[in-house]
Image (spheres, rainbow, N blue to C red):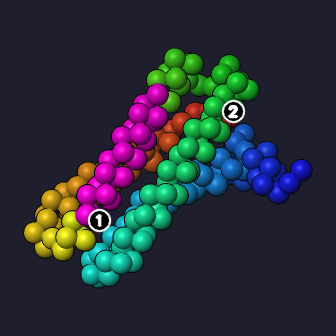
């Protein structure tokens, strides 16, 4: 088995029934608000090139991470034993749908703000004329990121943590 294939079937390291790649992804998702905060530090220091690069990198990693997270849940979903789960299948399904919905909204909103901000930066109106609007948009995205993190952790714990 190749090393990339073993990444997707190796046993996890967080003490749950999740596979290794799911543990790596959930660790990244939990760290995401701190990484975004670190990225915002570049903007506060007026190092806009580093800020733009870090936002693009975090967005890309988050997009790929959430896709792999959803794919991992889809792959493991057939094998999950809901009888040993505290929550009913209906509740678990509703939480999963909410997680998918909030993740999609977060990705779409974050992508849109990155695109608009890059255009404003190239037109030299950011920083400047649109800084206040950008700050409000960043706060909205950060709130969505926090919701995505909370819902991802919830889904992870419901599906993979067994007492």
State left or right for residue 12 relative to residue 70: right
Measured along the vertical axis of the image, is residue 114 above or below residue 129? above
Q: Secondary structure at mark 2?
A: helix
Q: Nearer the viewer, mark 1 or mark 2?
A: 1
How many marks can you see?
Answer: 2
Provide the residue span drawn in magenta: 97-119
Q: Does the magenta run of residues contain 38?
A: no
The percent coordinates of residue 57 (x first, y second) are: 47, 65
Q: Secondary structure at mark 1?
A: helix
> Which residue in the rendered view is the most extreme toward the left?
129
State left or right for residue 108 relative to residue 121: right
Number of the label disc, if any, that sits on residue 75: 2
First in sequence, mark 1 or 2: give its number: 2
The percent coordinates of residue 139 (x first, y second) are: 25, 56
Measured along the vertical axis of the image, is residue 132 above or below residue 17? below
**Residue that numbered label 1 is attached to:** 118
The percent coordinates of residue 24 (x first, y second) are: 64, 55
Q: Does the magenta run of residues contain 99?
A: yes
Q: Nearer the viewer, residue 100 or 86?
A: 100
């Amino acid at each position: 088995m190749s090393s990339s294939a073993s990444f997707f079937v190796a046993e996890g390291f967080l003490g749950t029934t999740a596979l290794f790649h799911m543990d790596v992804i959930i660790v990244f998702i939990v760290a995401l608000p701190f990484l975004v905060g670190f990225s915002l530090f570049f903007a506060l220091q007026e190092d806009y090139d580093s800020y733009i690069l870090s936002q693009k990198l975090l967005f890309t990693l988050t997009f790929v991470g959430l896709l792999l997270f959803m794919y991992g849940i889809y792959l493991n979903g057939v094998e999950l034993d809901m009888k040993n789960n505290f929550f009913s299948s209906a509740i678990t399904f509703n939480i999963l749908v909410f997680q998918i919905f909030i993740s999609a909204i977060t990705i779409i909103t974050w992508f849109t703000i990155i695109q608009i901000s890059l255009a404003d930066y190239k037109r030299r109106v950011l920083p400047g004329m649109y800084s206040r609007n950008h700050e409000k948009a960043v706060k909205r995205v950060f709130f969505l990121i926090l919701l995505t993190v909370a819902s991802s952790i919830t889904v992870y714990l419901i599906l993979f943590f067994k007492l």
